Image: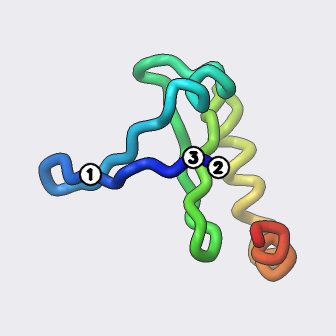
């Protein structure tokens, strides 16, 4: 696990991703990254062209599995 600082930029807060994370996910400047709150965790996803459709499908079934997902996130 890597620890990074939360910093204020204007009215928002920002986190800088370490180069190792950017390389591992094959991210590039201006790529879309999706963000989700899972309990007390923040989950970032590399957003692909199909991501929005897949995310919408997940959101329809997620309420049925929210307890299981919370346990898996622990």
SS label for mark 3 = loop
Q: Nearer the viewer, residue 32 or 14?
A: 14
Badge number at residue 50: none
Q: Which residue is mark 2?
A: 1
Image height of 18 relative to 60, above or below: above
Foreground tag (1 vs 2): 2
User: Which quarter of the image is occupied by the C terminus?
Assistant: bottom right
Residue 64, percent across and down? 83, 78
Residue 54, percent across and down? 74, 44
Q: Earlier in the sequence, mark 1 or mark 3?
A: 3
Query: Quadrant of the rendered structure where residue 21 is?
Result: top right
Q: CA distance from mark 1 to mark 3?
A: 16 Å
Residue 39, percent across and down? 62, 76
Foreground tag (1 vs 3): 3
Residue 44, percent across and down? 59, 47
Image height of 10 relative to 67, above or below: above
Q: CA distance from mark 3 to mark 2?
A: 4 Å
Residue under the point 26% across and 51% down: 7
Q: Which residue is mark 1?
A: 7
Q: Is residue 31 left or right of residue 48?
A: left
Residue under the point 57% across and 46% down: 2
Residue under the point 61% across and 54% down: 43
SS label for mark 1 = strand
SS label for mark 2 = loop
Badge 3: few (under 14), some or many (20 or more) residues near its Cα, within 10 Å? Answer: few
Mark 3–mark 2 CB contact (< 8 Å) = yes
Q: CA distance from mark 1 to mark 2?
A: 19 Å
Image height of 31 relative to 64, above or below: above
Query: Quadrant of the rendered structure where residue 72 is?
Result: bottom right
Badge 1: few (under 14), some or many (20 or more) residues near its Cα, within 10 Å? Answer: few
Q: Which residue is mark 3?
A: 2
């Amino acid at each position: 696990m890597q620890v990074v600082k939360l910093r204020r930029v204007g009215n928002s807060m920002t986190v800088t991703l370490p180069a190792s994370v950017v390389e591992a996910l094959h991210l590039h400047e201006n790529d879309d990254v999706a963000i989700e709150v899972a309990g007390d965790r923040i989950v970032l996803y590399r957003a692909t062209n199909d991501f929005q459709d897949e995310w919408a499908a997940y959101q329809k079934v997620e309420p049925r599995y929210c307890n299981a997902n919370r346990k898996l996130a622990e």
